[in-house]
Each structure stands twice: as structure tokens, then as C-alpha cells.
Amino acid sequence: MGRGSHTVRLAVTDTLLALAEGTSAPLGATLQRGGVNFSVHARGCDRVELCLFDALEDPEPSAVLVLEGEAHRSATYWHGLVAGVGPGQLYGYRLPADPDCLLLDPYAPALAVPAGYRRQRGQRRDGGQIGAGGGWAGAIKSVVADLSRYDWEGDRPLRRPARETVIYELHVRGFTADPSAAVAPGRAGTYAALIETIPYLQQLGITAVELMPVFAFDAQAAPAGLSNHWGYQPISVLAPHPGYATGPDPLAVLDEFRDLVKALHRAGLEVILDVVYNHTAEGAMAGAAAGPTLSYRGLAPHDYYLLQGEGDSLHDFDVTGCGNTFNANHPVVRRLIRHSLRHWVQHMHVDGFRFDLAAVLSRDEEGRPEPRPPVLFDLDTDPVLAGTKLIAEAWDAAGLYEVGRFVGERWQEWNGRFRDDLRHFLKGDSGFAWAAAQRLIGSPDIYGPRQREAELSVNFVTCHDGFTLADWVSYDTKHNEANGEANRDGSDDNASWNCGVEGETQDPDVLALRARQMRNALCLLLLAPGTPMLAMGDEVGRSQRGNNNAYCQDNPISWMDWGLVARRADLLRFSRALIAFRQRRDVVVDHANLSLSELLRRCAVEWHGVEPFQPDWGADSHSLALSHTSSEHRFRRHLLVNAWWQPLRFALPPTGLADGRWHRWIDTALPSPDDIVDWAEAPALPEQAYTLQPRSVVVLMARAAQGGGAAP
């Protein structure tokens, strides 16, 4: 059997295992002829024990294979080829420094989580993942998988251009967990249930779903009595979360996730994953944020994490607010991140990634901002990832803010300024007219120097983090008491306004104003150049009862209420109409491969106030107007915004087109269905002026010729 080989007899199955030296590459558990090659990076030890289990809740391994000596070690990699095992084999690693701790394989594509798993908090230096009585019945195990055993039926990532993309951020479980979802029995909150919602997503008109984290995560990383619902506590960067499967089979979850991707692709919808490479569920080494040792901290903590100090004063350098920071630019971690992304593209067929706290990935091994961070350039230039979308949340919890200057040639960015400036302007705050105007034309003050297309900016008004759209117009302050932290968690800066009453109300005037403000926000979001993103349920006014940090609320606070589809049909209709306009081919073509500066030059944007060509950028201005011609001169559009609390009469500029008349397409102050109409039915204005009601948005359109050309 070769140098360093020996045999071990399994106590339970009485299967004869043969252990040969194996190879350091590839990392993880790789199927070979007649067995599996195991390889793991572990530093500072003289041996590694590979523990095999016959059943998930067995308290002890069926076999312990010792990897030691030069036959099983290549530099910092420990490896062995084990004959007699195959797909479905449960395993973990144990190191001499902590024999009570079973460590997960960072490269395992599947995990098995026992019903008895309990997160250990700060009981030892490393926390540990141990079961009752020191056994491992409650420990999470890695699983050997054969990723070739799936029929994709010709499926491939869709590679839709960014200019055609409208993103819908949703939570896999939260989208179908509520009984109102009425999905098939036993499927609520699963990948399979999400497939049942595809017709709704198609009718809404979005082109991509951005799934909140589906990396396997620690659901117990939450205050006592609650669970981590959002999933930003990863325990693996390769394995899909087992909790979203319909059953306990740790390999079936792979197929269920791929079934979802395949079904979404068949419907023309891309799949973007919200990925977390900035921290893990292991928490801090010590203190109040201490967590369990699940994998990385046991295998090579100095490689996987940013650490400071020495000896007893050694501690995590935390710029994520989650207790630890992944050492993304260490060669070992860079390799893992790149392998993870390639895995999700090659084996799971996803179309893109949104990187949580992506600015963390630009820090060097001392935690300092790095002007040319290796990991980001790895991803920017990786040929396997060349056709995927890369979207950065270009900031971190320690104040590093890189919106507008994130590195690389093809990264898109979450435009946090779009959210903040539009919210402030629409709620009536002073001094935001000029900033809001910049957001409405692609943020040239931020992105103009980049010579990139307008879609570099991912525009949003709401996302999972913060108020929903309905709560933004219903609450002045956060109401996070249900999180068990005395309302201290979550941001206090929400740029929100309750329209006169805090929370729920039956006052018809307040409700009408709130509905108008939601239409205002949706209108500006979906008409602005860039890539728009909606948050789950905003199209029907979903509320979280004022909770702006519902990460631990796996209950109706966070779930999609499908009854709103009927109750808020007017808002849903408005949203669909806006998205449909944005997806028209004649509109999309106007953005085709143009840089933002070239797009603005061709469209010849003109700014106005209540009088044509007289914009007011003063601190007390609460209104603006802009007109532009499509780059192909097929139509002209005039956008007017009155964020003041009184009506304003706007004189209109000439259309400059043959038709000569403005037609009212949108007026958010009008009741449905007059708030947005089909172009063919848009009434012509009787005069060259229009009175905007308080806090409203109006969009006027003019054709290139009467009855000629495609209607925009």
C-alpha cells in the first residue's frame, strides 16, 4: 500500500479501511478510485487525527486515523488516502492541542448538523464544539460528497448584462416560512419552497434574486431564546445551509439548492449570493464575544484570523463587529476564498456574489487598508469568475468607507449614499437637493472619474439591514426590544419619518401620505441610472414592526406576509409597472455599454426649478426637476420632485420634439390606477405647467413624433 500505510478496522461497521499517504492537493475530501483523499491545512502540530463516524449522533468515531510523519505531511498540509469510504462519509479532524474539539474541514462541500448541536460560549479559550459528557453526538460533521452526481440538463449561468439587471434581495427561509405563503406541506422555508414562488418573481419583473447568506451558518449565534435568522455567522464557505433543506440528508441539500438554481435559470432569473468572507461564527478568542472553535481557530488561528498581541494578551482584531476578522489576504485564506467562489460558480451555477463588508477584504495582515489587496485582484482577474457579477458592500464596521473607490476593474458597489441622500431628501431634510440630484443621474460626483458604466452603482433605498420601506415611513425611531438587547442594537441613524404617527395607525390621511412616500422612493429608485435593488416585500409594503436589526427574528417579524399581495395590490401594480418600463428594450439599449459620463453627455441632462433652467441648490430647497432626451432621441423625459409640504406649481420647458406636448405618465399623488399609466394612455397636458401636490413625484414624457417610434 505504499510508504506509511496501515489498516484500521471500524468498530461498528467492521469495514476494513486502508490508509495510504495520499497527496496535499487538492484540499478537502476528494473522491479517488476506491477511496477518498483527505487533505487539510493545520499549523503547529506534530500529527492530525482524522475521525470517521458511522452515524451523525454517534458520541465517538468509528475509526480514528492518525496522520503523522513525513508520509502524511507536506509542509503545513496533512493528508491521507483512505480506501473503503465514499460519498456520505461523516468525518472531522482532531489536533493534539485540543483533543476534545472536533474540527470541520474548511473545504467540505456538505455539513451535517445533529439535532443535539449546542453552541458553546466562552467556556474555554476556544469554546469548543463538544457534546454532552465530552462526546461528539452534538458536534457538526463534515461530509464527503460527489459533486458530479447531478444532472444540470444543460443549465449554465445566465450572464445577463448589468444594464438589464433588477435585483431582488430575499431571505430563503423568510420568503416562504409564513403560513400565508401556502407552499406544499413540509416545504415552508426551504430551497424547494422558493421554487414555488418563481411565478410571482417573474410577474414582478425582477431579473435576479440576491439570496441572503446560504453558506452553512450557526443558527444559535444569537441572544438566548432566539436564533440567527439572517445567516451572517458562517461555519463553512462551501456548504449550503442544511437548515433550508426539506429533510436531514446532508447530501440531499446539495441537490435541493441546485434544483433551485436550475429552476430560477429556466425562468430567466439570475442567482446572486450574499457571501460572508469577513468573519466567521467562531466569535472572539475570549471575552463577551467568545464563541466555539468549529474549524479555522483550531486548525491555524494565526493564518485564518487577524490577531493582535502576544501570549496571554493575544486577541482578535475586530473590524467586523462580530468578534473576529478573517485574514483575507493571507495566502491560505486567499486560496480558500477563491476556491469557494469557483465552487459556487462551477458546481452550483450561481451568477454572482454580493460581498458582505467587502472593505475588510482590502485590509492587510496588520489590519491596515491595502491599496492593492491581493485577494480582491485575485477575484477581479480570475478567469473562472470572469462572467460573474461581483458586488461590494464597500465599507466595514471600523469606518473604512470605499464607496466610489473600491479596487479592481469590474466590481459593482452598493451605493450607500443613494439610500441616505434620497431618504433625507424625500423626508424633507434641508440641504439635500443637490445630493439627491446627483443620485438621480448615476452619482457622477462618486463614479464620474471611474469611466465605468452607470451600472457600477447598485442603487437601493432599503435592504435587509435597517427599516423596510413601509417602516421607513412609519417609524421615527427603531423598536428592537424583541431582540433582547434593550433596544441598544441596530442603527439610530435611519433618516426616517413616521408621517405624523409612530407605528400602526388607521388614520386615512397618514396612510395615504405613507403610501405616497413609498411610491416616491420606488419611482426614484427604479428610474435612476445604475443597477436597482429592491428588498423583499417592499413592493407590497412589508413591515418589521419598527425593528431595524431583525437578524435574530425567525418569526413573522421577518417573514414575508403574502396576504399583502392582495391588500397592497395598488403598490404592487405600481412597482411592476416601473420595473416593466425599465426592462423595455428601447430603454435598455439607451444604456448599452456607455460609461456614465458618455451616457450623461448623450442624454443632455438639464436642471430646472419651479421655473425652467433655474435650479435651486440652496439649503432650503426641497424640490428639483430635470429633463433629458434618450440617447437615441426616441423620447424625452421630465422628472419633477416636490419634497416640500405644500403644493408647488412648476413651469415646464419645451419638449424640443416634434410632438411638442408633455404627457403625464406618473403622478404619485394620484390614486391607483392613475398614479402610473400605460404610455399609450398617458394624457397630454393642457398647458406648459404642472402643479405637484405636497411630497410627490411626477414624470412627464414626450415622443419623438406623434405616433412614431417605440413607446418608452
Image (tube, grey):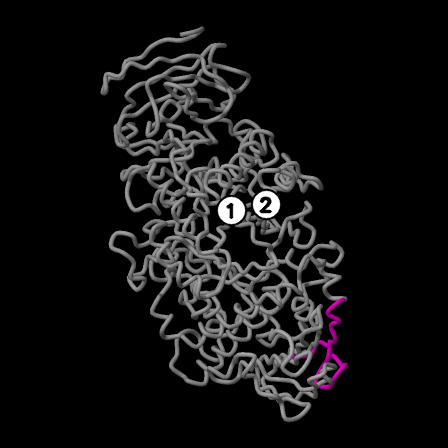
Kindly check if marks 1 and 2 are in contact, taking CB atoms under 8 A apart as contact.
yes
In the image: residue 705, left or right of residue 560: right
Residue 396 among those drawn in magenta: no
Q: Position of residue 453 (x, y in %)?
A: 68, 57
The residue closer to the viewer here, 78 or 674, is 674
The residue closer to the viewer here, 298 or 31, is 31
Residue that carries the numbered disc 2 in the rendered image: 387
Image quadrant containing the N terminus: top left
Instruction: Identify the residue at horizontal 42%, vertical 21% (top origin).
Output: 32
Q: Residues within 10 Å of mark 2 (few under 14, many from 20)?
A: some
- For the residue marked with disc 1, what is the amino acid? Pro
Q: How crowded is mark 1: few (under 14 residues within 10 Å), some or many (20 or more)?
A: many
Q: Does residue 356 appear anywhere in the picture?
A: no
In the image: residue 67, left or right of residue 313: left
Examine the rendered structure and indicate whether residue 196 appears above or below residue 437: above
Residue that carries the numbered disc 1 in the rendered image: 157
* Figure quadrant of residue 5: top left
* Figure quadrant of residue 533: bottom right
Examine the rendered structure and indicate whether residue 280 appears above or below residue 422: above
In magenta, the rendered stretch is: 602-623
Residue 608 among those drawn in magenta: yes
Q: Where is residue 82 in the image (x, y as percent from the top left)?
A: 38, 17
Instruction: Identify the residue at horizontal 30%, vertical 25% (top origin).
Output: 53
Q: Position of residue 217 (x, y in %)?
A: 41, 43
- For the residue marked with disc 2, what is the amino acid? Gly
